């Protein structure tokens, strides 16, 4: 399943004219290599790394995002978490987003209108990053496959994994983080927003 998703992602985002072309190409190849390396890559017990699923939650106008101030990492991030053996990372991302945000009835964004992609759902972003060591767990890599989901509901419900939750305009969201992977997601969302509204770049 993930093999097919990565193939679609390649068609959708790995383009020579993309400002993220080098990152996208390198991340995609590392993801493919890691996926083929072991049958245990979806388990958190597999070190030095494992696949995770994340979701950037936005409003229907693609102009605001819901973020979590992650308790363990002390950063403003999208929602997401471990696959725990589930190879359907789209399902993982949606489940984690609903659990961590308290938002019901989240929907994957349909990319067909925005980017002429008939596959659904498809990843929105790929990122490989190190998780620092803590307690008995050594430092390891998260191979994070991210999806874009839409919420009609605005009321967030905090849980034990977050210091704080909030909805932010993209300008406000940029003030919350300097993480390259977060800023890249905001850029992609702006691209989709302009495309759907037929606005010039």
Image (cartoon, rainbow, N blue to C red):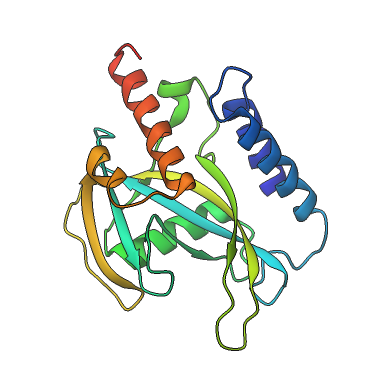
Q: Position of residue 128 (x, y in %)?
A: 61, 53
Q: Farthest left residue?
A: 155
Q: Residue at x 52, y 42 (%)?
A: 125
For this view, does 126 lie left or right of residue 40? left
In the image, residue 94 sits, relative to residue 151, either above or below, namely: below
Q: Quadrant where the C terminus lies?
A: top left
Q: Using the rendered image of the protein, determine whether residue 104 is visible from the camera's viewpoint.
A: yes
Q: How many marks?
A: 0
Q: Position of residue 114 (x, y in %)?
A: 41, 23
Q: Using the rendered image of the protein, determine whether residue 1 is visible from the camera's viewpoint.
A: no
Q: Position of residue 40 (x, y in %)?
A: 75, 68
Observer-nearest of 77 and 74: 74
Q: Farthest bottom residue?
A: 136
Q: Position of residue 132 (x, y in %)?
A: 57, 72
In the image, residue 175 sits, relative to residue 139, either above or below, namely: above
Q: Residue at x 55, y 23 (%)?
A: 18
For this view, does 115 lie left or right of residue 172? right
Q: Residue at x 63, y 41 (%)?
A: 5
In the image, residue 121 sits, relative to residue 196, either above or below, namely: below
Observer-nearest of 77 and 108: 77
For this view, does 48 lie left or right of residue 113? right
- Image quadrant where residue 144 sits: bottom right
- Image quadrant where residue 76 sits: bottom left
């Amino acid at each position: 399943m993930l093999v097919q998703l990565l193939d679609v992602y390649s068609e959708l985002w790995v383009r020579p004219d993309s400002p993220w072309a080098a990152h996208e190409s390198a991340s995609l190849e590392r993801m493919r290599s890691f996926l083929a390396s072991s049958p245990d890559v979806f388990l958190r017990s597999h070190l030095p790394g494992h696949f995770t699923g994340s979701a950037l939650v936005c409003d229907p106008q693609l102009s605001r995002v819901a973020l979590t101030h992650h308790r363990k990492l002390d950063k403003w991030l999208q929602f997401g978490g471990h696959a725990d053996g589930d190879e359907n990372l789209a399902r993982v991302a949606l489940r984690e987003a609903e659990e961590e945000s308290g938002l019901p009835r989240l929907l994957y964004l349909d990319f067909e209108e925005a980017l002429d992609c008939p596959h659904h759902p498809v990843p929105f972003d790929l990122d490989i990053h190190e998780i620092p060591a803590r307690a008995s767990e050594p430092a390891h890599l998260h191979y994070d496959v991210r999806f874009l989901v839409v919420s009609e509901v605005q009321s967030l419900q905090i849980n034990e994994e977050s210091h704080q939750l909030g909805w932010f305009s993209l300008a406000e969201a940029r003030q919350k983080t300097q993480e390259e992977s977060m800023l890249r997601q905001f850029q992609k969302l702006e691209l989709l927003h302009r495309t759907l509204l037929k606005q010039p770049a």
